[in-house]
Image: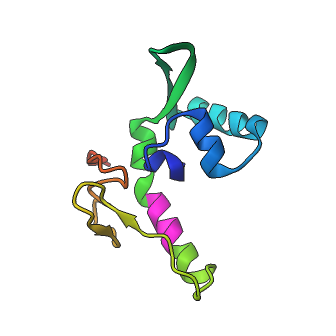
Amino acid sequence: MREAYYDVRRFHEFELYVGIAPNILSARLKKLVSAGIMRQVPLPEHSRRNEYVLTEKGRDFFPAYLALKKWGDGWLADRARPQVSFRERTAGDLVTTLGPEGPSFCPCGRHLPASGR
């Protein structure tokens, strides 16, 4: 899901960035689609290929992902190496904290709707 928040959409891009075998990646993407976290969108230039895009449910998971990442950075990461940080694409603002409504944007620069929950 991390790559999806960075606007990765195509299977070969996920394969490149995640670095896992195609059969494992395919199974994981199918699970995310069946869970309603991602959806497949046909590519107009390739009738038999799809992009994988986050649904509202998937975008709504971003605050939870950020909280898990923050916990991992604090308790599991090697302090000698710099941690991965998120920046809003357009303005370059660092995403460091979560407010009561979570972050108002994702790393790909798209504004997230309020969850309403």
Q: In the picture shown, does residue 108 fall above or below 37?
A: below
x, y percent for residue 99: 28, 67
Query: What residue sits 54% from the left and 77% below the top?
Result: 73
Q: Tell whether 100 sits left or right of 54.
A: left
How many circles with numbers are drawn on the protein? 0
x, y percent for residue 106: 35, 53
Give the quadrant of residue 87.
Answer: bottom left
Name the residue at the left extreme.
Answer: 91
- Stretch of the chain drawn in magenta: 64-70
Query: What residue sits 63% from the left and 36% below the top?
Result: 29
Query: What residue sits 54% from the left and 82% below the top?
Result: 74
In-front residue for pair 28/50: 50
In-front residue for pair 20/76: 20
Q: In the picture shown, does residue 55 fall above or below 86?
A: above
x, y percent for residue 23: 77, 35
x, y percent for residue 67: 46, 67
